[in-house]
Amino acid sequence: MNGQVNTSKPVTVSLFDANNAQVASVTANPDGTFNLQVPAGTYTAIASATGFLSAQGSVTVNSGAATTLPTIDLLAGDIDNNNVIDQLDAMTIGMNYNAAEPVSADLNSDGVINVLDLELLARNYRVTGPVAWE
C-alpha cells in the first residue's frame, strides 16, 4: 500500500485492523510519499503530523494488487492535538510569538512562530478532524 500526504512537517501513516490494533506504521519520506507492506484485509489508515489535523479513511488491500491511497493535504492549525482548530491554537501562537517552541506551533517549520504560522491556522479556523481520507 502506498500514497502521499502533503504537509510541512514529518508525517506518520499508521494502519489499524478491525479491533483497532495497530498493524503497521511508517514515517513518510520528506516529499510525503510512503509505502507499507501489509497482508490483504480492510484497515483504517491514519495520517498525522504535529500541529495538523489528522486524516483518516478506510482502505482495502487485496492480495497481489497494488493499493494506492489518494494524495491528501493535512490541514495546519491543530496545535493542541484536540481535533479542532480553534482560539486555543491561535492563542498558543500569540503567546509564543517570535519563539521556536512549542514546535507544534511552528506550522511552516521555518524555526520561528510568527504571522506566517497564524495565516496557515486562519485558513483552517474552526475545521474539525479527523479529515476524511477518501
Image: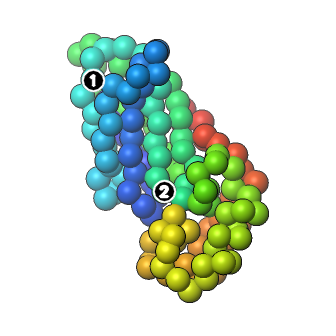
Most foreground residue, 87 or 60: 87
Residue topped by disc 1: 38
Q: Residue at x 44, y 78 (%)?
A: 110
Q: Examine the rendering and report whether any part of residue 37 can be seen.
A: yes
* Disc 2 from disc 1: Cα separation: 25 Å
Q: Residue at x 68, y 77 (%)?
A: 94
Q: Which amino acid does label 1 sit on?
A: Val
Residue topped by disc 2: 50
**Quadrant (top left/top right/bottom left/bottom right) for the C terminus:** top right
Q: x, y percentage for residue 106?
A: 51, 71
What colour scheme does the image use? rainbow
Q: In what element is the residue under mark 2?
A: loop
Q: Residue at x 48, y 56 (%)?
A: 50
**How many tags in the picture?**
2
Q: x, y percentage for residue 13?
A: 39, 40
Q: x, y percentage for residue 113?
A: 55, 78
